[in-house]
Amino acid sequence: MGVTIGGRHGGHGGPPRGGTPHGGPPHGGGPLEVAPFLRNVTTEGRKEFDSVLRNESLTIAEMETKLTALAEKYGVTAEYTEFEANRTARLTEIRKNVTDVIGNLSTVFSSISTIYENKNQTRQGQREAVEALRVQYPNEVDTIQFIREHVGGGRHGGHGPRGGPPRGGPRGGHGGPRGGPRGFRPRGSHERQESA
């Protein structure tokens, strides 16, 4: 059993999302409205579930025990158990996918480095090579870009840590913004860059 009711996860599957430690919004409404097993629970019952989820003094084990007891109290044990089983299966799949991406990062980073070190191609060819790699490894390429932006001092390359050597691609018209190679950005980042 887990601590999440509203389809977001915290506590068992990763960092909390949303405004509360369990993924709910910071102001009223709570994550409970979306849980299918609560459709036939009274408003008072939903408030009880919500109260347990928002009680930050409970351990996760205590919270699970209380949620299970409330599901029994309101006659939705089967639905709650199914909801939790589905959530656990989703988290297992997410963990597997994350593990797969992490396992591929070194190989994909090596491929990206080879693309950018190849001087016998045009910048368009470079962009096309990165995009071809992105088709095969979309999450890995985006993850490497994310890491690069954070350790490289900025978007699309940057100049490395303060006082350190440049880390982006070659400068002087051979790269993108701040010296980073063009074509190496997360999907949708060009819209963010243009609006910035």
Image (spheres, grey):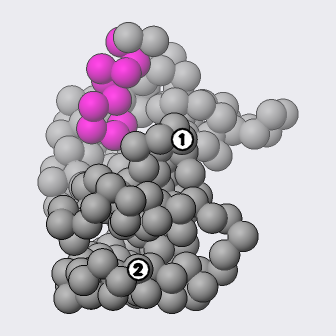
- State the extent of the magenta-drawn residues as a range: 185-194
Quadrant the C terminus occupies: top left
Q: Judge whether 22 appears above or below 163 on screen.
A: below
Image coordinates for residue 105, horizontal then vertical, percent: 41, 68
Main secondary structure along the magenta-highlighted residues: helix
Residue 59 covered by magenta stretch: no
Mark 2: amino acid: Leu
For label 1, the crowd category at 10 Å Cα-Cα, with few meaning under 14, some 14 to 19 and many 20 or more, is few
Q: Quadrant of residue 182?
A: top left
Task: Please name the residue that numbered disc 1 is placed on.
Answer: 26
Q: Judge whether 111 appears above or below 164 on screen.
A: below
For image coordinates 75% across by 39% down, the residue present is: 161
Q: Nearer the viewer, residue 181 or 29?
A: 29
As helix, strand or loop, the secondary structure at mark 2 comes to: helix
Q: Nearer the viewer, residue 25 or 106?
A: 25
Q: Left of 17 or right of it: where is 115?
A: left
Image coordinates for residue 102, horizontal then vertical, percent: 43, 73
Residue 188 covered by magenta stretch: yes
Mark 1 or mark 2: whose residue is earlier in sequence: 1
Quadrant the N terminus occupies: bottom left
Q: Tell which tag, 1 or 2, sits nearer the viewer.
A: 2
Image coordinates for residue 66, horizontal then vertical, percent: 51, 82
Task: Please name the residue that numbered disc 2 is placed on.
Answer: 70
Image coordinates for residue 147, horizontal then vertical, percent: 53, 51
Q: Left of 166 or right of it: where is 43?
A: left
For image coordinates 27% across by 31% down, the residue present is: 188
